[in-house]
Image: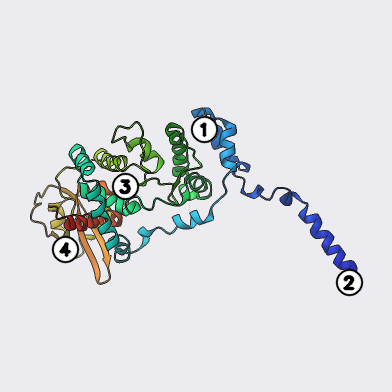
C-alpha cells in the first residue's frame, strides 16, 4: 500500500510538471499577456510608427522588477534633513567636486557665461546625482520604466508617458533601448535626466553631432546649465539664506510649499527674519523652508533660484543639499 501511494504521488507530480506552467515557465513574467501593455504597444505603432514585432521582442526580453517598486516606495527624501544631509555633504563629494571643476574648468566657465548658471551649481548637481559620473545607475532603464508603468498604479500615468518618451529617445539617438542603464526610476547619464527631460533640455554642447550625457562631460555640463536656464535661473541672484522664525504665524508659509509665494516683507510680518544683509528687497518673493535638525527646526528663505533647483527634483531637501554642497566646493576652490 505504501508503495502504491508513493507511485501515485510521483505520478501526480509528473502530471503537474507537464502542465501549462512547466511548458512555459516564463508565462507569468510576459508583459505582453496584459491588455494594457498590448494597448501601449498598439499606441506606439499607431502614433509613432514603431514596428510591432520589434516592440514585442523588447517587452519579451524583460521581466517585472519588484525591487524597483520597493526602491521608489522608500525614497531618500522621506528622511529628515539631519539624516538626508549626511548622504551628500561629505568629503568624498566635496573633493570630487573640486577635482571635477579643475579638470573641466574651461567647459564650466563657458557654460556659466552662456547661461548665467554658476559653475558651482552645475558641479554640485553632478555630484549629488552621480558622484561626477562615477555612478550612473545599474538598472536597465527600459525594464524599470515598464515595471513602473504597469506595476505601480500610484504613478502609472507619469511613467507610461516617460516610457513613450524613452522609446522615442532611443530611436532618435540610435541606441538600443535594452542597452541603456540608469536609476530605478529611469534617470540616465551624468545629469540623471529622465527621458522627457533629455528630449527637451539635453544639448550638444561641444557640437560633435550628438547629445551624449552618458560619456561626454561637455554635454553633461551644458545640458545641466541649459536645464536651469530654461527653468528661469536668475543670474547673479541669491539662492537661499538662513532665517529665524518666532511665534506660530510663520507655519502658514511653511505649509505653502517650495514655490516663492510671500514677499520677504510679508514673511517678516509673520515673524520670519533673515541673516543676509545683501538681499534686502522687501518685495522679493520667497518660500519659507523648514529643515528638521536633531535639536529642532531650522528655517531658510528660498528665493527664485532655490525654486529652480527644485525643478530638477521637487524636494526642498534635495535643493538644499545641492546648495550646501556647492558652497562647500566653492569654498575649497576659494571662489567668491
Q: Nearer the viewer, mark 2 or mark 1?
A: 2
**Would you name the residue on which mark 2 appears?**
2
| Residue nearest the viewer, comparing 54 with 43 | 54
Q: Nearer the viewer, mark 4 or mark 3?
A: 3
Above or below residue 12? Residue 139 is above
Dot placed on the residue nearer the N-terminal end, 2 or 4? 2
Question: Which element is circle 4 on?
Answer: strand
Mark 2 burial class by Cα count in 10 Å: few <14, some 14-19, many 20+:
few
**Would you name the residue on which mark 4 appears?**
244
Q: Nearer the viewer, mark 2 or mark 4?
A: 2
**Would you name the residue on which mark 1 appears?**
44
Residue shown at 51% from the left, 27% from the top:
49
Dot placed on the residue nearer the N-terminal end, 3 or 2? 2
Q: Quadrant of residue 273?
A: bottom left
- Mark 3 and mark 2: span between their CA atoms? 69 Å
Position in image of residue 215 (x %, y %): 36, 43
Amino acid at each position: 500500500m505504501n508503495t502504491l501511494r508513493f507511485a501515485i504521488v510521483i505520478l501526480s507530480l509528473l502530471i503537474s510538471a507537464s502542465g501549462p506552467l512547466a511548458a512555459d515557465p516564463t508565462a507569468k513574467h510576459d508583459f505582453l499577456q496584459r491588455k494594457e501593455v498590448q494597448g501601449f504597444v498598439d499606441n506606439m505603432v499607431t502614433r509613432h510608427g514603431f514596428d510591432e514585432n520589434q516592440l514585442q521582442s523588447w517587452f519579451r526580453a524583460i521581466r517585472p522588477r519588484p525591487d524597483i517598486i520597493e526602491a521608489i516606495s522608500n525614497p531618500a527624501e522621506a528622511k529628515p534633513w539631519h539624516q538626508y544631509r549626511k548622504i551628500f555633504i561629505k568629503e568624498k563629494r566635496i573633493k570630487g567636486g573640486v577635482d571635477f571643476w579643475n579638470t573641466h574648468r574651461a567647459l564650466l566657465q563657458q557654460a556659466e557665461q552662456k547661461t548665467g548658471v554658476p559653475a558651482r551649481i552645475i558641479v554640485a548637481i553632478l555630484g549629488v546625482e552621480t558622484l561626477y559620473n562615477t555612478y550612473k545607475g545599474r538598472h536597465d532603464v527600459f525594464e524599470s520604466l515598464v515595471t513602473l508603468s504597469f506595476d505601480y498604479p500610484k504613478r502609472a500615468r507619469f511613467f507610461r508617458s516617460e516610457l513613450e518618451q524613452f522609446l522615442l529617445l532611443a530611436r532618435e539617438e540610435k541606441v538600443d533601448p535594452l542597452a541603456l542603464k540608469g536609476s530605478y526610476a529611469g534617470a540616465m547619464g551624468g545629469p540623471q535626466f529622465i527621458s522627457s527631460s533629455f528630449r527637451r533640455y539635453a544639448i550638444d554642447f561641444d557640437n560633435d553631432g550628438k547629445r551624449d550625457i552618458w560619456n561626454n562631460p561637455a554635454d553633461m555640463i551644458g545640458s545641466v546649465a541649459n536645464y536651469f536656464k530654461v527653468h528661469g535661473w536668475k543670474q547673479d541672484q541669491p539662492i537661499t539664506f538662513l532665517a529665524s522664525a518666532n511665534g506660530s504665524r510663520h507655519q502658514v508659509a511653511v505649509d505653502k510649499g517650495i514655490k516663492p509665494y510671500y514677499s520677504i516683507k510679508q514673511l517678516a510680518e509673520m515673524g520670519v527674519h533673515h541673516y543676509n544683509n545683501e538681499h534686502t528687497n522687501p518685495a522679493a518673493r520667497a518660500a519659507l523652508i523648514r529643515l528638521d535638525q536633531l535639536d529642532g527646526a531650522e528655517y531658510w528663505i528660498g528665493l527664485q533660484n532655490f525654486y529652480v533647483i527644485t525643478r530638477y527634483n521637487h524636494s526642498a531637501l534635495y535643493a538644499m543639499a545641492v546648495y550646501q554642497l556647492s558652497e562647500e566646493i566653492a569654498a575649497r576652490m576659494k571662489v567668491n
